[in-house]
Amino acid sequence: MSRSGSSHDLRRLDLATAHLDAPFAIVDMTAFRANAATMTRRAGGKPIRLASKSVRCRYLIEQVLAMDGFRGILAYTLPEALWLAARDTSDDIVVAYPTTDRAALARLAGDATAATSIAVMVDCAEHLELIEKARASVSDPHQVRVAIDIDAGYEALGGRFRAGARRSPVRSPADAVALANAILSRPGLRLVGLMAYESQIAGVGDDPPGRPLYARAVRTMQRRSAAELARRRSAIVEAVRKLTSLEFVNGGGTGSLEGTSAEPAVTEIGAGSGLYHPTLFDAYRGFTGQPAAMFALPVVRRPGPGVVTALGGGYLASGPGSPSRVPAPYLPAGLRLDKEEGAGEVQTPLIGPAADTLRIGDRVWMRHAKAGELCERFSDLHLVEGEAVAATVPTYRGEGQTFL
Ligand SMILES: Cc1ncc(COP(=O)(O)O)c(C=O)c1O
């Protein structure tokens, strides 16, 4: 069974939200701030660029940017970055994933504030061409800030074993130098940074529950990958810095804050999930976070002893479609999902001794497997301070923005 909360938290959260009708989502702000402080400490003095996909709430993003230890936004789409820049959320935004959105690129090139605030990610000549075409489509285009994404995946056995996200084809110092030269030869583009995200370390828990052999394999892979990447990342940064000065070298994520920040070549970490601390981040030995984002479902039926049925709940996380992506009952302690039905489209049965303590209209508290994706299900987040809702703020969705 997954991690459960305390009866004290159950009483506190029920009390704070007694006036609300479920389903709804909350952020426990004490946990959220404690998680932010833990992340900052783990980053060892290097700034954290906030991965906005993992928060998806402008109010909370602005709160985090005002905290010590966080600097700038790692956005997930260019329309999102343009939207954030236009609202003055930040003037230091890096879009972490390449874009082929011609209209958004034209808006970027045509707007002085956007062009100075936003950098877009590239990893091939086609990306550069798209930017050049967008610049050509506006009058008086601005220089476009770009960063190169480096493949930080781990390869062994002559490439027959691979771990890590399949993203950039730029892997070696020579690859990076070639693309950097292609950027530098275009006066409309300005190379400002490098990014190399080691998903196989930052996003893969090294302490998966009930899987000791797999855990051992993960730890071995991560140890070897970290050593290989530290050497390669530093060689790439050194080679590109010989061509031009760089404003940032971004790496890592919530699961690798201390390791990545210890690399001299890295100037900042991109991270965000640790703030909400969803269930996937329970599976790490190196740190413990406090569940901060949760959603409440109403108990609407009692099919029989030992089971209640709640309304909604099937908020699955993206990824490989494994059981780890399903939301987990959190409070009251002692509930589990039904193996046949899981978390349902409109109804979610919850099984276990705690079910018999729940009445129609009570609520169960659930945790999402990932961080910001929860916000695609709710228009608002209720921010809980102690035993009260201190504020209710819109998610991106609540502001009418669904970027992905
Ligand atoms: C480029 C990049 N950097 C960093 C992260 C880490 O983000 P988080 O700490 O929110 O999981 C991710 C997550 O997918 C990413 O894609």
Image (cartoon, helix red, strand yellow):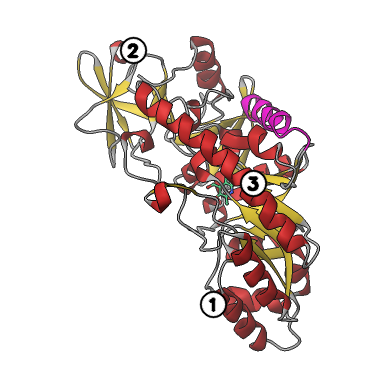
Q: Nearer the viewer, residue 231 or 309?
A: 231
Drawn side of residue 69 relative to residue 398, left or right: right
Any part of residue 199 in sight: yes
Location of mark 1 (residue) = 126
User: Dot 2, crowdedness within 10 Å: few (<14), some or many (≥20)?
Assistant: some
Mark 3 to mark 1: distance in Å?
28 Å
Within the image, what quadrant is residue 274 found in? top right
Report if the CB atoms under discs 2 and 1 are less than 8 Å apart: no
| x and y, in percent, of residue 275 in the image | 61, 34
| Residue at 54% across, 31% down | 277
| Residue at 57% across, 55% down | 399
Locate the N terminus by quadrant.
top left
Location of mark 3 (residue) = 231
The amino acid sitting under disc 3 is Arg
Mark 3 or 2: the one toward you: 3
| Residue at 69% across, 64% down | 119
Within the image, what quadrant is residue 320 found in? top left
The amino acid sitting under disc 2 is Ala
Does label 3 or label 2 sit earlier along the sequence?
3
